[in-house]
Amino acid sequence: MEHLPESFNEPVVVDVPTLVFAGTLDPITPYLDSKAQAEAMPDARYVEVPTGGHVVAAFDDCTKRARADFWSDPSSTDLPACVADLVPRPFAVS
């Protein structure tokens, strides 16, 4: 079995507009890794979704708007105000 070099897990640093979504319950990409990646990139916007999983770009109307706004104008550094107020979806066990 071939092992990957340690550098494989280092953040990529590019200076291009990037939108990073992170679900706090993502079992594939831990949200802290996504946050670190966004912080390493000078032109990244970061959206943290409480209790979100791996695919949160369409979590709710707010994340959909953030994605659509970014696609419309990647050079804008603004995120919708609602991003600061994202709330977890209710969790129920039946």
Image (spheres, grey):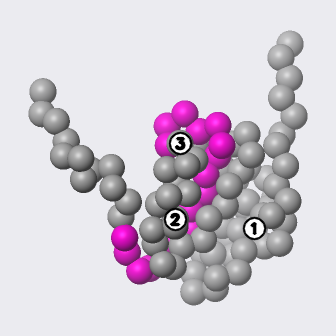
Q: Which residue is mark 3?
A: 30
In the picture as drawn, the residue positioned furthest to the left comes out as 2
- What separation in Å lies between label 1 and label 3 (alpha carbons)? 23 Å
Q: Secondary structure at mark 1?
A: helix
Label 1 vs 3, first from the N-terminus: 3
Disc 1: which residue: 65
Q: Nearer the viewer, mark 1 or mark 2?
A: 2
- Circle 2 residue: 38
Q: Which residues are magenta?
A: 13-29
- Residue type at tag 2: Ala
Name the residue: 16% across, 36% down: 3
Answer with left or right where residue 72 lies relative to residue 85.
Answer: left
User: Front-most of 16 and 59?
Assistant: 16
Instruction: Locate residue 62, reporting x and y percent.
Output: 80, 62
Residue 90, given in percent of the width and then of the height, sits at 87, 34
Tag 3: amino acid: Pro
Binning the other alpha carbons within 10 Å of mark 3 as few (below 14), some (14 to 19) or many (20 upward) gives some
37 above or below 24? below
Is the Cβ of the residue at disc 1 closer than 8 Å to that at disc 2? no
Residue 79's x, y, as percent? 72, 74
Label 1 and label 2: CA atoms lie apart by 19 Å
Give the left or right position of residue 5, taking residue 25 as reference. Answer: left
Regarding residue 73, the answer to whether it shows in the image is: no
Q: Under tag 2, what secondary structure?
A: helix
Picture disc at residue 19: none
